[in-house]
Image (tube, rainbow, N blue to C red):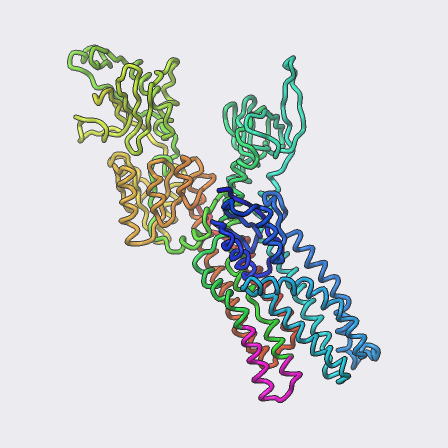
Amino acid sequence: METVHWKVEGMSCSNCVLTINHFLEKKGMQNIRLSLAGGDLSFDINGQHSRNEIKNGIEGLGYQVVEDSQTAPPHIKSGNKYLRYLLICLPFTAILMLHMLDHWIHLHWLMNPWVQLGLCLPVYITGMQFFGRSAIASIRNRIPNMNVLISIGSTAAFVYSLTGTLLNLGPDYLFYETTAAIISFVFLGNYLEDVSLRSTQRSLSKLVRSQKVMAHMLTYDEHHHEHIFPVENTQLRSGDLILIKSGEQVPADCKILWGNVSVNESLITGESLPVEKTSKDHLLGGSTLADGTVKAQVTAAAGDSVLARIIQMVKQAQGEKPPLQQLADRISAIFVPVVLGIALLTFIINYLVLHDLTSSIMRSVAVLVIACPCAMGLATPAAIAVGLGRAANNGILFRHARSLEIFRNIRQVVFDKTGTLTTGENRIKEWGMVKEPRAESEGRKTEVGEREIDEDEFKRIVYSIEKYSNHPLAKGIVKSWKVAHPIKWKKLDEIKGLGIRAEASNGDIYEAGSWKGVKNIDRENLHQIYISINKKCIGWIDMDEEIRPEAAAVIQYFKSKKIKTILLSGDRAKNCREIAARLQMDESIAEQSPEEKMACIIRLSQEFPIAMVGDGINDAPALAKASLGISMSEASQIAMQTADLVLMGQGLRNLPISMELGRHTYSTIRQNLFWAFFYNIIAIPLAGFGLLTPAIAALSMGFSDVLLVGNSMRLYFRKIDQSV
């Protein structure tokens, strides 16, 4: 299936999201994600309907679709539209409102009902052009939205006034200023809300703007003369050659061919300190060359770059709905019909009690326009947009919005050892060869069949096997033992939790891995890596690991929060106990295969929700089973794909920030939902009892959303515990 990424403009409340979702589901679309805060829509198209058909269908509901969602500036069109409508309506509304000052300013001409009708008509037509069309489309789709309330409320006041004008019933029947005020104030509220929502997207917008830059593309003629052409980075493809100068932004993911540079990767990793890079190192698109010039080869087109995947990941997470939002959505789906019922009941009760048609109509109109389903729909998306945006700015990528909520329940954090608590930089501490009795006097030599293996041949075998592994221990060996003529293998497989098996051209089986794949060894004196030929052990290697400098502080942070820390590794028990003791961790579980790690996570999860931090292939099953899987940016692809959260830089340093952001975001969502429900529970009765005029009610409705978004914006500035 093809995944479509669009931006939808013109949504004003959660019912708009429900309307579009309902339409796409009817068309058979799958994996639908739509963010009210950002307007980003993604879904899998099934092939039964064309893109144009789906696009026309959404626009037929009263919304606008921008197909290039990667580069479209968020909410610019809808923001300008609200402002344009407001500027059209405001002058007429202001003049109409002057008659309220008749006690001080005698404007007898303004009391003429036909003059008021002439001033109100442009405002009413403009309002119905927007609210009315949207209301009719939503009713047709059987999910009435907030615009139904606005349309009915303003139309009731207008028709009542028009009746008074046509029948010459006097000034007591003229409420043209109420119609105009409702429409103008709602446009004002929508515009302010739109501006506020754009602010919640500023971190993501910063990343989006960084996607599109100019690049210096290198080409060569038939005489091998170099030529430089300026091109937009969206035109670059894998394999293209580019020149990047000091101070410029890296236009695409690439590999350095020539030059040494200092790179600022803060946009992607959150790390502000420059990183030194040289030939064969990789540069991330979106980073900036602080110093130096390089020639590089593009490794991924703009749409497939790390930055593009980050942006898409954040957008998809914003489109998801955590459990808290699902309750608000269920209420929003029935909110408009319920409010219509309350408004009708308000009219009936007031008329029976007061015997005053005018007052009864105005109170029911006030009920219609003060009710605000938007607040319930915005409560979660606004907070999530800010939380995910701030996280992305710190090099923290949440794959799922629900992960922000899960953090509040975490009571145990399980860490893999190699590459997670340690830097992944390993050096050979000790090594030895298993010697035959007759070879004892000849130093480091061993025999396999008729073949004698000396020290150099042993290193050649080890290097030839380990150079194909991404495991941190293997990388340490390859870095220490480089040989000129490695063995060419007939077949090579990496086995999770055990090591690597290679088959030579003569059929011999070479293995490098843990003790579990070797027979007849001393279990009392286990080593980290064993090398064997045809199951016969020929030597062993012990590595010395460097613990990440921030690891101890991260463990102490969790201990201060009364969260249990556990070391879970496939390495020897002795090594794991030593590292767990040095870091003062609560528990150490060693010598675990990937399946055993997964079983361990399942068992621990039955006690309390658990977070798992890992980076290797052998961690992937456990990461998938944990309540919250957390991966490092240097992790294997499979580990990153199964994780819920990816730490893009600075090792474990951002893990406490992730937890704090998750908890603060959840707290903000709860505050927003409380305000949304409290506002409607209080405001609707006040309007029903006549304590608020329809104009004030419309203004209150608009500002309730702005207040809610403003509370979400506090997440940008809220102090986060960054003591690590």
* Residue 546 as seen in the image, left or right of residue 293: left
* Residue 98 as seen in the image, left or right of residue 324: right
Tell me, yes or no, whether the highlighted magenta stretch contains residue 362: no
Q: Quadrant of the C terminus?
A: top left
* Residue 560 as seen in the image, left or right of residue 136: left
Residue nearest the viewer, comparing 613 with 275: 613
Q: Position of residue 224 (x, y in %)?
A: 63, 14
Viewer can see residue 606 = yes
**Which residue is farthest left?**
437
Residue sitting at 27 percent across and 42 percent down? 588
Tell me, yes or no, whether the highlighted magenta stretch contains residue 340: yes
**In the rendered image, the vertical position of residue 135 relative to residue 532, given as above or below:** below
Q: Position of residue 522 (x, y in %)?
A: 17, 27
User: Magenta residues?
Assistant: 339-361
Q: Position of residue 47 (x, y in %)?
A: 51, 44
**In the rendered image, the vertical position of residue 419 relative to residue 384, given as above or below:** above
Viewer can see residue 315 = no
Residue sitting at 32 percent across and 50 percent down? 564
Main secondary structure found in the magenta portion: helix
Q: Quadrant of residue 155?
A: bottom right
Residue nearest the viewer, comparing 79 with 562: 79
Q: Position of residue 695 (x, y in %)?
A: 67, 73
